[in-house]
Amino acid sequence: MRAPRLLILLLLCGSCAARGEAPQVQFLLLPSAEAVGTFARDALVTQPYDEVLRADMILSLQRGPFRLFTEYLLSDHEGDLERFQLGYQFSSDTVLWLGRFHQPTSVWNHDHHHGQYLQTSITRPAIEEWEDLGGILPQHFTGALLETSRPLASGWRLRMAGSGGLAPQLNPGGLEPFDLVHPDHHRRQLGYHARLSLHPGDLDESGFGVLLAREDLARIGPPAASILGLDHVQLSLYGVFASYVEDPWRLLAVLFHADARLFFDATPSRGDSFALGYTQAERRFGHDLTAFVRLEGTAQAADSRYLGLFPAYPRSRQLAGVRWDFAPRQAFTLQLTNSHTFTGHFADVRVQWSAALL
Amino acid sequence: MVRLTHSLWVRMMSVVLIILAALAPLLYLGVSRIVEDGYQERFINSVRAYSRLVADQLEALDAAEFERRAGAVLDGVVLSGQVVFAQIVDGERKIHSSITPALGAASPREDYTFGQSPDQVYYISHQVRRPDHAVVLRLGFDEIPTSERIRATQRHVLLAIGGFVAVSIGLALWLSAVIARPMVLLQESAKRVASGDVHVQLQSHSSIREVAELNLHLERMRQELVGTNEQLTREIAEREASEHKRLTLERRLLHRERIVALGTLAGGVAHEINNIITPILLYAQMALDELPASSDLRADLQRVVESAHRARNLVWRILTFSRQSDTQAPSTVFALRAPVEDALALLRAIVPTNIEVVFRCEAEGVQLTGDPNFVQQVVFNLCTNAHQAMRRDGGRITVTLAAEEDPGEPQLRPGRYGVLEVSDTGEGIDPAALPHIFEPFFTTREVGEGTGLGLSVVHGIVESMGGLITVRSASKLGTTFRVYLPVAVALSNAAGAA
Amino acid sequence: MIARRIIVLLLLLGALAEAWPAAQTLVLVVRRDSPVTDLDSVTVRKLFLGVPVLINGTPLRPIRNRSEPHLDEIFLQQIVAMSQPSYDRQILNGVNRQGWLAPSEAASVTRVAAELNANPNAVSFMWERDVAHNPNLRVLRVLWSD
């Protein structure tokens, strides 16, 4: 349904860019197939969807300082234009994007986006899960994103990113971001994000930084019992992250403190705070075998009225697995996960094939 | 079964060993390859990035600084650790690190893969651009630490796989023991059951469900077997008892028929003799009566009369045995004890002193219907028989009176019986003679010592009273006759010694 | 006799000289009229790692010369200073995360020269001897020398 519109859009963009100098084009396809088995289950709700087949398509065009960057995800249950960014490259280090993008305070998503091959584990951390898969924090915004970096003395580099845009809406089924292909005219509110990080080198993945976000999430749709009378939610996020990448080790830790204030139609607003974070360790054995383990947790989750809107949210989760890059740009991953949600506990085992076609 | 259990263990271990033999080398080769590739790639990444960094630093130096610091940079590079050769080639001039010895005139060859050089040094050359000309930075990285690390890790892998193999074998041994032990116990129990010891309980106490269920089912089979066996044993015993009873009855029937036939024959002969004797006795008596007292013939006739009386007495006994006596007394009800005691009183008078006569009465008031003289005759004959058996060595004759309800003898109808038991401590009766003792004229004594009619007369009396006589004899232990006579009225079961 | 021997010796020496490998030099090249005048080694590395490099507001277009395996080895060792798997992963990450463009690849020197001729912002590398056959190309710097 949406795919034809996307293709038309891309053709339009391509034809515009085709005038004059031929643009540089880059296409990347990241397909994956996954099998999931859930066991030891007493939770009422687990994951809203288990995407079995995915094809993540990335198209990048550049003509002079202008850039177009799109990411389209086709899976067995959806086809979405995940990212659509028109950019202007001010310099080698600075680019301004307009369009739909992944907000920069999500460390995981900013690094891996929707591509399964490029992330070691099969699943992403619960606090950075996509909105349509039960995510609790908004990930897709439509607006402006500025990314820049500055060299510092002693070779270190300061990377900065700031964004502002239309925030997802809150409906009884979860968060729903703005859809460029099927735009709606519901009430939307804004969200702002900032990310500052220091890295030892130009292209170094090691580093640490701070993450700040302020998001207003308007409530739409028929009022469910759990959000009866809720008008909107104001989320303030204060986070830190650190990553250490030194072959064969790769460590990542992210911690957020969140203030959520729920505004109601008739009654005074209610506020609650909670903290969430995760840490992942990966160890490479040879160049084709990687073991990983990740711990995720949320503090004060039980008292949070905001988190109560997401019954499938795993407030604590432990996972471990192994990835085998059995062929160039192809990998098999096996992952065992133990999750505790508000409604109970469940465990699952996942096997995934993923690949990259450049 | 032993072979089966043994082969189970052997097979399990064989499978484990085959799997390990196939898996361990593959595992070692695979992991070694992973280790080698990993270390080599890490080494290459590291040395390439480092040498590029050094080249970039040198390129960033201005001319004066380059001249002043080039040697120091090379020294720093060497001191950083892995670099064993550092050189800058500036045209004809070669700047070396002061720490490492200079190579010969020949330039080292560029390496692109780990372990390419025989000297175990990985050489990288970078063009370093200077304002007016280019110089070449040549760095040599020591491959030995990485090679050693690879070998050390491979050794650890080998050890780990060796440990894994050892643990696997240990686990396999333990597992096969866990599986085989209850099977062996089961097998031993089953063997004992098979050899007939069906009361051995089959208990293996295995935590393995299949073995436990096998044990359960075998135990049920054993219990079924035990039940069936007991039933069969019982049935066989019953059949044997029944057969024994049948044979006894058959033997007694034959015996009885023979005695009856003998009795009929003897009775017929006795009648005829009686008919002959009667006129002999009558006319001899009449002749005697007519002879004068002083007649010499009187003594002869007296002998004829006496002989005729003895013959008549003999005939009477034969007729009594054959129950054809014409002189049967009318039936009366009498106490059993009285004729017994009368007979014993008479007997005590005739038995020698070396023979003790004991009387026990365990049932007072037992009354019979018939002629008490017959009972007296029975007791007398039996005791005479006993004392004659003991007259040489002495002994004891015990006469016991008792009463029994349904004695269990197949020839007797149910009911209450007076029991007269006469036992002696004599030599006992020869087993070969035992079946014939009640036959008339059968005797084991010397010629002239008996007529052989005593026991046959007893038998005839008892039969005529509706009773039964049994005999039990053991060599050197004595003989016991047991006479069952149906009671007229059962008055009491009171027991008491006489 | 002696003259014949001298002639044979000279012929042998000449043959040896032909067979003796000439010193190889790898150079960074652009089109002769390219606005690019100079690139330091750090920028060259970034360029071939997919990082956008702008000259006068125009992004440069890196072309990876894959005409022979030896060039690949030198490229990985001297230019990007990485192993092949690391380079591959770096390129994929750049495309996925930032929308960077992976360097285009040319399988022959002719193709490299054609792409360089077609785009003044294109940058590539080739043997110095190959540049001599393409007068429309200009050497920016020496990357590696045997």
Image (tube, coloured by chain):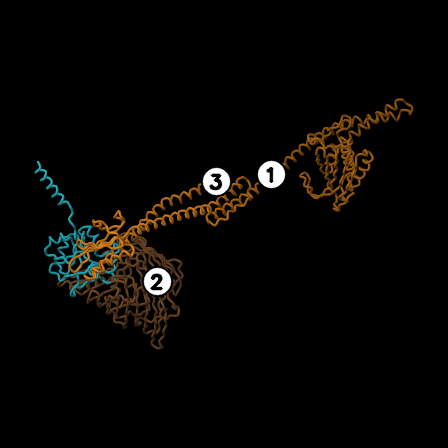
Chain colours: A brown, B orange, C cyan
Q: Are marks 2 and 1 on the same chain?
A: no
Tell me the residue that label 3 is attached to. Answer: B2
Instruction: Return the residue nearer the eye: A142 or A321.
Output: A321
Q: Residue at x 67, y 39 (%)?
A: B410
In the current view of this chain or complex, which residue is farthest to the right? B294
Instruction: Return the residue nearer the eye: A167 or A259.
Output: A259
Tell me the residue that label 2 is attached to. Answer: A279
Against C32, residue B340 (above or below) is above
Q: Position of residue A233 (x, y in %)?
A: 32, 72
Q: Which chain is home to disc 2?
A: A
Q: Which quarter of the rendering shows the C terminus of chain B?
A: top right
Callout in the foreground (2, 1): 2
Q: Residues within 10 Å of mark 3 (few under 14, many from 20)?
A: few
Q: Residue at x 84, y 26 (%)?
A: B305
Q: Amino acid at mark 2?
A: Thr
Residue B212 placement, left or right of B474: left
Q: CA distance from mark 1 to mark 3?
A: 40 Å
Q: Amino acid at mark 3?
A: Val
Against B94, residue B309 (above or below) is above
Tell me the residue that label 1 is attached to. Answer: B239
Callout in the foreground (3, 2): 2
Give the SS element for disc 2.
Answer: strand
Instruction: Return the residue nearer the eye: B295 or A306.
Output: A306
Residue B153 placement, left or right of B121: right
Q: Residues within 10 Å of mark 1 (few under 14, many from 20)?
A: few
